[in-house]
Amino acid sequence: MLRAAVLQLGSIPWDTPATLSRLHAFAREARAGGAELLVFPEALIGGYPKGMDFGARVGQRSDEGRAQFRRYADGALTGFSAVGEIARDTGLWLVGGVIERDGGTLYCTVTYHAPDGTLTGKHRKVMPTGMERLIWGFGDGSTLRAIDTPWGRLGAAICWENYMPQLRLAMYAQGVQLYCAPTVDERDTWLPSMRHIAMEGRCFVLSAVQYTAGGEWGSIAGGSVIVDPFGHILAGPLRDGEGLLFADLDVARTMEGKFDLDVAGHYSRPDLFRLLVNEKVLAAVDKMEE
């Protein structure tokens, strides 16, 4: 049995160290509540600058907007040791959203840390939505990989990646049992989507949503939830406040669900439908070997 927790929390605008400190405090609280796994929201570390346009118009960019982007990039992570230290200090499996800087590009990323602080994997959002494409790059298929945990296979799809049927199928085909869905989507439509995914994938869904009460980066009302493989809500949805949700998960129950629905197995009809996934690292420059 796995005691899992989902954190609903918002970023402190322009202050990554302070946000990390708040994550650390809630991680300790989750561990004190018996949790072994904690999922936190999309872009929590580095922030989701809701409502900002960074001075961009079609064919135009402003000096002020460029300065804002530089400030935003200054808050992104170039390595994940600070998050790993939180996992190590609390003894938690820690899964959640950071803004990652790689060279001159930012990515909306989910990191997976083991209780000893080791980075066991990461996933970069493959399809930023709308204006997100202005500030974030596109991840490739090399990070579309689930990881092994003591309780089963774990993977993540970020925000509206959950509306990409092909991506979901790629995760289901890896045997995902703990399906993490960090997001900032506060809409009422998010909850039925999470219940659908749990039933479709016959997996536990742990969705962590940001919560902010307003300010420079706007308001986000939350909606975090934990759902079982049959679409039943185990905890949440949490609305209009920050906090933790807990649930005890019998991960072996995912096999009970596969009895009559395995969309990547006996329910797949590969004679009719096939999905190809490119898992190669896609680099702008490759060096030729001599």
Image (tube, rainbow, N blue to C red):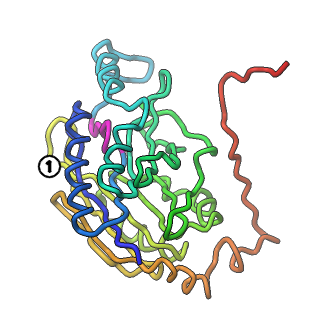
In the rendered structure, the answer to whether residue 221 lies left or right of residue 207 reads: left
Up the image or down, 98 lies above or below 260; here it is above
Q: Amino acid at mark 1?
A: Ala
Q: Main secondary structure of the magenta part?
A: loop
Up the image or down, 250 lies above or below 15; here it is below
Q: How many marks?
A: 1
Residue sitting at x 32%, y 40%: 45
Residues in magenta, as a range? 43-51
User: Where residue 11 sits in the image (x, y, percent)?
Assistant: 24, 42
Identify the image quadrant of residue 31.
bottom left
User: Where residue 107 sits in the image (x, y, percent)?
Assistant: 46, 36
For residue 49: magenta? yes
Can you identify the residue that label 1 sits on? 213
Residue sitting at x 28%, y 40%: 50
Up the image or down, 55 lies above or below 208; here it is above
**SS for callout 1:** strand
User: Where residue 271 sits in the image (x, y, percent)?
Assistant: 82, 71
- Asked if residue 111 shows in the view, the reply is yes
